[in-house]
Amino acid sequence: MPLTNPVIIKLNEITTMVEDKSKLSESDVDEIKSIFKELVKNGERYDVDEIEFWFENEGSWKTREPIIRIANLSNYVQDKHQQTAHLRIMSDDDCSCGH
């Protein structure tokens, strides 16, 4: 699954935001999670391998560890969203139980 333009835009934002590309700070990690949460909330889907490949080929990331960490964060956020999406309880307005 190729990356969509909205996903690529967010990956560029991550690249711009992270000052030290050899290691991620805790604030970097929090912001990256937030970016991926926004993407999945907006219905965007992505292949984690494509995320990793994009960062490897972007040019400014020379160290592999932060790339792997970002890919893992993207996977975690997407998996968590998919697991909770089918567990959401319908509101009373959506209920077709006759109330």
Image: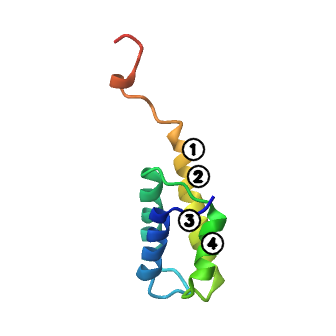
Which quadrant of the view contains residue 60?
bottom right
| Disc ID at residue 14 | none
> Residue at left 52%, top 36%?
87
Point out residue 65 in the picture as x, y percentages from the top left corner.
63, 80
For disc 1, the marked residue is 83
**Dot 1, how many residues are within 10 Å of its Cα: few (below 14), some (14-19), or many (20+)?**
few
- Residue with the mark numbered 2: 79
The location of residue 68, given as percent across then percent down, is: 63, 74
Query: How far apart, in angstroms, are the residues tagged by discs 2 and 4?
Result: 16 Å
Image spot of residue 24 (x, y percent): 51, 80
Give the number of callouts. 4
Task: Select label 4 or label 1 by which is in front.
Answer: 4
For marks 3 and 1 on the same chain, the one whose residue lies earlier in the sequence? 3
**Element class at badge 2:** helix
Residue that badge 4 annotates: 52
Q: Is mark 3 on a helix, strand or loop?
A: helix
Q: What is the C-alpha distance between the residues marked 1 and 2?
A: 6 Å
Give amino acid for label 2: Asp
Per the image, the residue denoted by label 3 is: 73
In the rendered image, which quarter is residue 95 located in? top left
Cβ–Cβ under 8 Å for marks 4 and 3: no
In this picture, residue 12 sits left or right of residue 70:
left
Q: How far is the residue under mark 4 from the one under mark 3?
A: 11 Å
| Quarter of the C terminus within the rendering | top left
CB atoms at circles 2 and 4 under 8 Å apart?
no
Q: In which quarter of the image is the N terminus?
A: bottom right
The residue lying toward the viewer, choosing from 53 and 23, is 53
Between disc 4 and disc 3, whose residue precedes? 4
Say left or right for 31 vs 70. Answer: left
Vertical arrangement, residue 96 with respect to residue 53, above or below: above
Between disc 4 and disc 1, whose residue precedes? 4
